Image: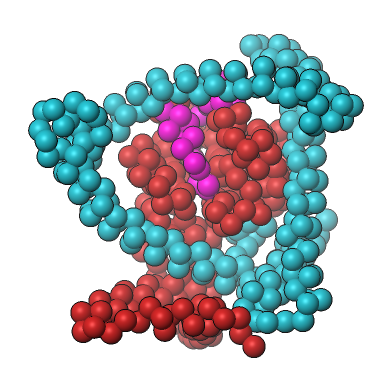
Amino acid sequence: MIVKGRIVDLIVLVLMFAVTYALMKSKWVPSIRKISAFDGIKEAIGRAVEMGRPVHMTPGTGSLNAMESGPGLIAGLATIGYAAEVCVSLKTRFIISLGSSDAIALADALLRQAFLSAGRPEEYDASIIRYYPGRDTIGSSLAFTNSVQGLIAREKPVANIMIGPFYGEQIALCEVAARQGAIQIGGTQSITQISIFAAMTDYAVIGEEIFAAGAYVSKDPIQLKMIAGGDFAKIAAVALIILGIVLKMLGVNLLPLLQV
Amino acid sequence: MSILLRTRVPQVLTSLVGLFLLVTYFFELPRSIVDVANFIPRFCVVIVAIAVGVGTITLLNHHVSLIRKREAGQWIYSIVMLVTLSLFVVVGLGMGATDRTFSWIYESLLVPCSTTTYAMWCFFIASACFRILRVRSRESLVLLVSAILVMLSNAALGELIWVNFPLVGSWIQTVPMMAVFRGLTMGVGLGLILLGIRVLLGREKGYTGGT
């Protein structure tokens, strides 16, 4: 028996699962449009190689267990994993600032994998990861922000990659990095914080692009098909909105039907 | 540790737990199964507590290494950090988190420091605003004009200059801004669902080091 009030949610989820699964099984391989921010990662790291200065990356602050920050943190870690692989392959120094204690183990695994893939596992150094207590530990990102500001001012990175959950602290971080002349790439899933990244960074990851990081950088056909599935869902959502507007104008109220 | 243990096992575990929680969210199930589903988030709290321990060790390693190397301009602050951390732990464990001494340390050390540094951010925000509002393209001109109008609509001075400034500011926030917000909300929502599906199907490998 389905819980009352969740029937439509379940239908939508099952439909999305079905469309995504059908696309996964199909032979069609969709192409993904250019996302400048992810292409900008290579450019920024290349500049760091030329200038001999480090790259700074952070997946923000929050917790993997929190609904509002967990998915963003996963997406941020995926991007950082890719950026770390590029840095390791180009033998560039990089630093990862973490504001989430539960992301340390994941970041550690990502880095070990990056060094292993480059054939130099012995070069892995745990001090690449700098942990500064954030929201999940002390309920405020102030300590994290101040520490990362200090780190950026001291290390003078050429590139500053910030993708993950941010709650306003990115203003201070972007400003310090801008004073060091760093190329900045930023993105967050938080609707209210995206505008700050859009205004302050050289490359901003807008909206749901943040969740396409894994697919974009890996170019894995299955993941690309799943992204295409999301686009179909978007088209369906827009069609439903238009249908809802038309029906509302005709005096038909769909709302009670959606709440069953 | 083999790649199987490091990447595949966490992915399979995530998929299984995720599917189980989804089923318990959508379907009416026996009390015993619902109890297990309710227990999982509590189990997460335990994992987070362990993660905080890992975090503390990482933090200690970093600061001890700075002190050992006598890192210029940093090692003194690392000592301050280690002393404060030890003081908190000793007082917290010895007297309890509800003790007045513990609250006093928090309210007299951490709160003033936090407030002071937070207040200093205003200078960063001011220079960041200057950087953001420089007109470099047509889009940044739109941003500058909108920002000025919204600022004037919120400041008392704006209404003195022109009585309709609050109306203009309110229109910007409720019509064009809301339209963009709703579009973004829809996109992010669908993106989240798809990320969830990818995680459940074990196709999202990035976070476990499988890009």
Depth check: give the residue in front, A90 or B12.
B12
Foreground residue among A88 and A230 = A230
Q: Is residue B64 visible?
A: no
Which of the 4 image quarters holds residue A239? bottom left
In this rendering, the answer to whether B151 lies above or below B14 is above
- Tell me the quarter of the image containing the N terminus of chain B: bottom right
According to the colouring, which chain is red? A
- Label the cyan chain with its letter: B
Say how many tags the image has. 0
Rendering coords of residue B2 (x, y %): 81, 60
Q: Is residue B167 visible?
A: yes
Residue B163 image-quadrant placement: top left
Residue farthest toward the right in the current orientation of the protein: B94
* Colour mode of the rendering: by chain
The image quadrant where one finds the C terminus of chain B is bottom right
Q: Does the magenta stretch include residue A168?
A: yes
Residues A236 and A22: in front is A236
Residue B124 to residue B141: above or below: above
Residue B30 at x, y percent in the picture: 77, 81
Toward the left, the furthest residue is B162
Q: Quadrant of residue B78?
A: top right
Query: Above or below — where is A36 with respect to B37?
Result: above
From which residue to which does the magenta span run? A146-175
The residue lying at 61 percent from left, 28 percent from top is A143
Name the residue: 53% across, 78% down. A5
Q: In this view, does A115 lie above or below A5?
A: above
